Image: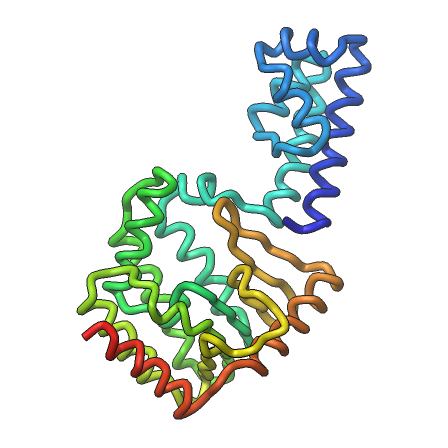
Amino acid sequence: MSTDFQQAREALGLRLRGLRTATGLNGKEWAGRLGWQRSKVSRLETGKQTATPVDVTAWAAAAGAPEAADELIRRLDRLETHYRSWRRQLSAGHRAVQERHGVQESQAREMLIFESGIIPGLVQTPEYARGVLTDVSARHGSPADVEEGVTARMRRQEILYRPGRSISMVLWEAALYVVRCEPPAMAAQLDRLCGLVGLDAVTIGIIPLGARTPFSPKHGFWIIDDRVVVADTWSAELSLDSAEDLALYRRLWTLLHGAAVHGHQAHALITRARGRLA
């Protein structure tokens, strides 16, 4: 989680604590007034849990300061631009998430993409994408609008063929072996990846298993126009835009790209993974 996000969450917690202490109630009494567990009050005030709009509205009302709710919700909105819970995002369905990403990507001139365990959405086949989105729906209990999500994800791929774009991808070789759909569909996905090697607007590098590297493949990330880094965790999507974060991920990208093989060597690794499916 980004330092900027955590600091903002802690600042919100301090603001909530200020509203509580102004009433003269301690944490236990405050929890009783709201009908919450004492631990929830503590987590919100210390920035260990992100409040919801319902939480802060109830907090402001309990403090006798309902006018503070708008300010608290604006603080939450700013937090949400940096940290978007998958459960909250997917409450509107896969299509909405895919379309939001599509708008961001359509405006980009350069994208640097690293993935350690999945084929990037911009080059997924419909069958592979269907498997991924079905798994996501099951994992998060989100609306199962998988077909609409697949259609929107395929529409995002139009930017691969637009002039003036530069898209560079680096995959850990392990991503070629993580089977997210039926084996024949996975084989078609690897064929699709092979067909993109050598494309003018898209470069694909593969970091071989067993290669000596000065880093670990902690998570995937996308650097968009050297303006924002989008990184996924199990529970959320992070948007990092501080100069410090951008510089760090740029350095990581340089190391990852330098460890990867390209061209016919990348093609050979994909073909080898394809052969294992047979």
Q: At 54% across and 46% down in the image, what residue appears?
A: 84
Give the camera-side residue of 49 and 143: 49
Determine the residue positioned at 66% across, 27% down: 44
**Residue 259 x/y as whole percent:** 56, 81
Q: In this view, does 98 lie above or below 39?
A: below
Q: Is 19 located above or below residue 228 in the figure?
A: above
Which residue shows up at 31% across the image and 84% down it?
A: 195
**Image height of 64 relative to 120, above or below:** above
Q: In this view, does 181 lie to the left or right of 7?
A: left
Residue 128 figure quarter: bottom left
- Return the residue nearer the eye: 266 or 204: 266
Residue at figure coordinates x 75%, y 63% from the top left: 243
Q: Where is residue 47 in the image (x, y as percent from the top left)?
A: 69, 33
Picture colour scheme:
rainbow
Residue 269 locus on image (x, y percent): 37, 82
Residue closest to the eye, 22 or 7 = 7
Using residue 263 as the reference point, say whether residue 52 is left or right of it.
right
The answer to whether residue 222 is above or below residue 141 is: below
Q: How many marks?
A: 0
Outermost residue toward the bottom in this view: 264
Q: In this view, does 77 lie to the left or right of 268?
A: right
Q: In which quarter of the image is the C terminus?
A: bottom left
Side (left or right) of 156 relative to 29: left
> Residue 39 appears at what percent x and percent y?
63, 20
